[in-house]
Image (cartoon, rainbow, N blue to C red):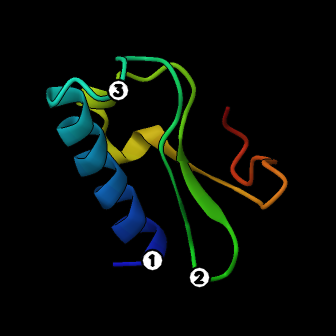
Amino acid sequence: MTEFEQRAAELVEAGRSLYAQGMVPATSGNLSARLGDGRIAITVSGRHKGMLTQDDIMLVDARGQSLDGRR
């Protein structure tokens, strides 16, 4: 498993847990995690935090620019 895949799995679990506890709204905001090389794994726009999958996590650089063409 790559570092990105590990962080994506952690973000999916965090989203589900935080949503279940009423700590995050369904589709507002983002969850993110910095990777060792400085890239950032972040939830894509508009996804329900309690229903995230690894496909809902994208990569951005330190300036927030998409590295995989998604938003």
Q: Point out the tag, 1 or 2, that comes first from the N-terminus.
A: 1
Q: Amino acid at mark 1?
A: Glu
Q: Is residue 18 above or below residue 27?
A: below
Q: Residues within 10 Å of mark 1 (few under 14, many from 20)?
A: few
Residue 9 sits above or below residue 29 on the image: below
Task: Identify the residue under disc 3.
Answer: 24
- Residue depicted at x 30% and y 58%: 9
Marked residue nearer the N-terminal end (1 or 3): 1
Q: CA distance from mark 1 to mark 3?
A: 25 Å
Tell me which amino acid carries mark 3: Val
Q: Are marks 1 and 2 in contact (CB under 8 Å)?
A: yes
Q: Kindly identify the residue that appears in the image at 57 percent across and 73 percent down.
A: 35
Q: Which residue has dot 2 on it?
A: 36
Badge 3 element: loop
Q: Say whether residue 63 is left or right of residue 8.
A: right
Mark 2 is surrounded, within 10 Å at the Cα level, by few (under 14), some (14 to 19) or many (20 or more) other residues, namely few
Q: Quadrant of residue 20?
A: top left
Ranked by sequence position, the earlier of labels 3 and 2 is 3
On the image, the x and y values in percent for residue 38 come to 70, 74
